[in-house]
Image (cartoon, rainbow, N blue to C red):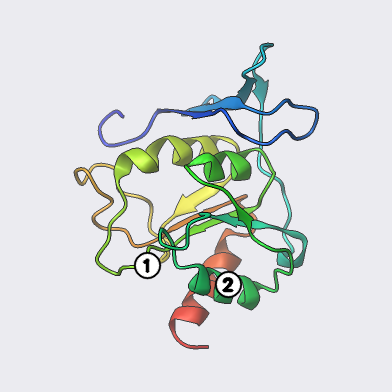
Amino acid sequence: MEEGEVVLGVLGCPAFPADQGHEPGAIFYGVRGEGAFRKSLGGGDPVSISTDQHSRPEEVRFCESVESAHAAHDVHAEISGELGITAPPFRMDSQAKYAAVASGMASIYLRLPRSESYREKIWDHAAGAVIVIEAGGRVTDFSGAPLGFSAGRTLADNVGIVATNGPLHDRVLEAIQAVRSGG
């Protein structure tokens, strides 16, 4: 972090699923202004990664935590339904969900904690956020505000996390607003 801005993020994902000719397990990293990359744990050179460019929600998958105690799966399902997403959620643990969005395995990552008073820890989201952004995506809270990594140990001014491929971000925020306002 430099002056409250994340400039480098690294995610170690030893159990990350194999995809697009990659072996399971990888290190993902993003450098502000330089892009996002995947390096296989099996060796080889890093490869540039980018988000998918899907703009139709019915074509995409969203990811969320495996544990329903960690996130409001019911609210995520309502948002997914509002968007018209038909694929089941891609459930995985850890912040590897950011890697899934950054590498195009999923188009949306939603995380709304079950408790309104809970605030996310910055160390759980800083690395993933810069990786998604550098891969071409967007990351905000549920209201569309940027994540505030300079407010201390938590994202004190943010509620929820939305990471997307970019083209879908505004539609996801509209769906969140529709669900939160009751229709």
Residue 79 placement: quadrant = bottom right
Residue drawn at (29%, 28%) of the image: 2
Q: In the shown orientation, is residue 20 left or right of residue 83? A: right
Count of numbered circles in the view? 2
Return the x and y of residue 157 as percentages of the image width and height: 26, 58
Given residues 90 and 81, the one toward you in this image is 90
Nearer-the-camera pick, 7 or 79:
79
Residue at image point 69% right, 63% down = 88
Q: Mark 1 or mark 2: name the one nearer the start of the chain.
A: 2
Residue under pointer 1: 114
Badge 1 vs badge 2, beta-carbon distance below 8 Å: no
**Residue 9 percent coordinates (x, y):** 44, 29
In this rendering, the answer to whether 43 lies above or below 174 is above
* Circle 2 residues within 10 Å: few <14, some 14–19, many ≥20: some
Q: Residues within 10 Å of mark 1 (few under 14, many from 20)?
A: some
Of 158 and 90, the residue lying toward us: 90
Quarter of the image with the N terminus in it? top left
The residue type indicated by label 2 comes to Ala
Establish if 34 lies above or below 94: above
Snapshot quadrant of residue 101: top right
> In the visual, does 55 lie left or right of 100?
right
Q: Which residue is mark 2?
A: 77
> Residue 132, image x and y in percent?
54, 40
